[in-house]
Amino acid sequence: MTRAEHDTVTPADKDATGEIAQPPGHVEVWRGNEHSPVEGAPDGVITLKDLEVYYGDFRAVTDVNVQFGSKEITALIGPSGCGKSTVLRCLNRMNDLVPGARVVGTVAYHGVDIYGPDVDVIEVRRRVGMVFQKPNPFPKSIYDNVAYGPRVTGMKVDSMDELVERALRGAALWDEVKDKLKQNAFGLSGGQQQRLCIARAIATSPEVILMDEPCSALDPIATAKIEDLMAELAKTYTIIIVTHNMQQAARVSQRTGFFTAEADEMGHRTGRLVEFDTTEHIFGNPSDERTEAYITGRFG
Amino acid sequence: MTTTTVSFGERLRSGRRSSTASMVFTAVLWACMAIICAFLFFVLFTIIQQGVARLDGNLLDRQPSQIRPETAGVQSALFGTLWVIGLTAVIAVPLGIAAAVYLEEYADPKRWYNRLIELNIQNLAAVPTIIYGILVLAFVVRGPLSVGAVVLAGGVALALLILPVIIITTREALRAVPEEIRAGSLALGATPWQTTWKQVLPAAISGIATGTILSLSRAIGEAAPLILVGATTFITFNPDGVFSRYTTLPVQIYTLVPEDRDAYRDLAYATILLLIIVLLAMNAIAIWLRNRYQRRW
């Protein structure tokens, strides 16, 4: 069964049959993923221009110029400490929470610099949702977890029950939790918790979903479910995912950015974007030898 | 080959190398525990033995009397304690939690004034209680406010006394809330205020409640600052407001103990027992709250 055939059924239906699209860890060699290959340049729904991020005096990442395409999955890969998570956290200004973090350059969302002076950071985060590395449900009921975003952002909703159901169905979790919506979210398994976090993120109807190594704390089966879910979500949402797992990047994404960190003569390591292209190109025929070395496992 | 296997197995089995030292250490730890417990149980036992006779209806029903101490009670002191501690809670809890939220969630720790505040709070927790009594005597009982020796003054003194403790325990409870909860809330578009109010404070409530109740139960046992601010020693009426004169259980005990008549001493023991019961009840509530709302991350 291929992913393409699966795309005709909703994730919720899939779960009802108890089937998982493909056994975990099944990709050995890059053979292209089942999404239609992307042509041309991305539309640049988020565009980074000369992005530089500092933590205090430490320059974590520099010289990032990239355009992300809407309704695509873009993967950011690279060795630890290369700044890919830092770049991701700039896209909804979560770096604001880090004391001493400073962003230079522009992060343009629909052409508006979200670090501009009169930008409402709350509005940015409502439109650009985020799923974290470790599942972080709130210590509340499943229902309240999903309803939290719409409530705090003052969304006008006709029926919160419907919205919660829609979000949980969208995250392929509804059938597993519909009878225990009032139970504490901590009772769910790790994979279910992460899908709950995805449901929570899509409940506020964002346009972009950032995922920071969303599967690194999950087992292969839960990972496969999340990956299927991502393919489904990419029809509606723009997804940018940071991952350490190159097979995962190859499986799910249409475009890939490769970061690496190189020490300068002073010994300071600063992350850079080495190459950004279609996933097919990055994994099949990378232009930069550093990308090739990383992909083939000779480095990193 | 065989010899290697045997010696390897022997090495594995002879793993408890320093078993003597470990036993001695365990024994010392047990001895320390035993001494502490023996002391505690001796005190408790003595108080119960001496006090249980007068722990009767009269103790709660009647007012102190210098004519008939055999049947006198400490009702005015019990009510005084409840009034003072209630007022202490009303003043100290909101202030303390608010200060802790500011320091933990909003303050920039790099600013010199925030560091100064933090340092001062640490120091205030170590200030002798009598100093708070003097402070309130000078500024509330007399001086600028001049409210006199009333419940309000006692409440202010005890509130000042436990404020640093409440701030410190609340900050610890807030710090125990994982950063991911805050990040998750903010990433959904919640404001810092919504994040604090709807996620962080509810998640920290058990720690905050426990710390608050424990510091209140410390305040309940205080006599020194209250004597200074005039928790008058002989009061035969219950306080009826924050501007009423009052006495409290520890102050009552303080005046009863030096009396040489047996009836007074019995009454003092019974009053101590009553105070301990009130304290244990508060600690029990604290433990119950902690278990009831405990969260595992």
Image: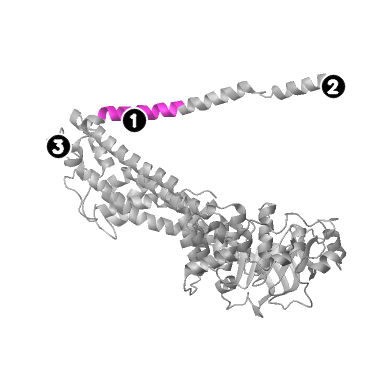
In this rendering, the label closer to the viewer, 2 or 3: 2
- On the image, the x and y values in percent for residue B276 come to 31, 37
**Residue linked to disc 3:** B66
Within the image, what quadrant is residue A225 found in?
A: bottom right
Residue occupying the point 61% across, 53% down: A190
**Which residue type carries mark 1?**
Leu
**Which residue type carries mark 2?**
Met
Residue occupying the point 85% across, 58% down: A296
Q: CA distance from mark 1 to mark 3?
A: 27 Å
Between discs 1 and 2, the one toward the N terminus: 2
**Residue linked to disc 2:** B1
Classify residue A37 as left or right of residue B89.
Answer: right
In this rendering, the label closer to the viewer, 1 or 2: 2
**Which residue type carries mark 3?**
Gln
**Residue linked to disc 1:** B44
The label number, if any, that marks residue A23 in the structure image? none
> Pointer 3 indicates a residue of which chain?
B
In this rendering, the label closer to the viewer, 1 or 3: 1
Mark 1 nearby-residue class (10 Å; few <14, some 14–19, many ≥20): few
Residue stretch rendered in magenta on the structure: B34-50
Numbered disc 2: secondary structure:
loop
Whether residues under marks 1 and 2 lie with C-beta atoms below 8 angstroms apart, the answer is no
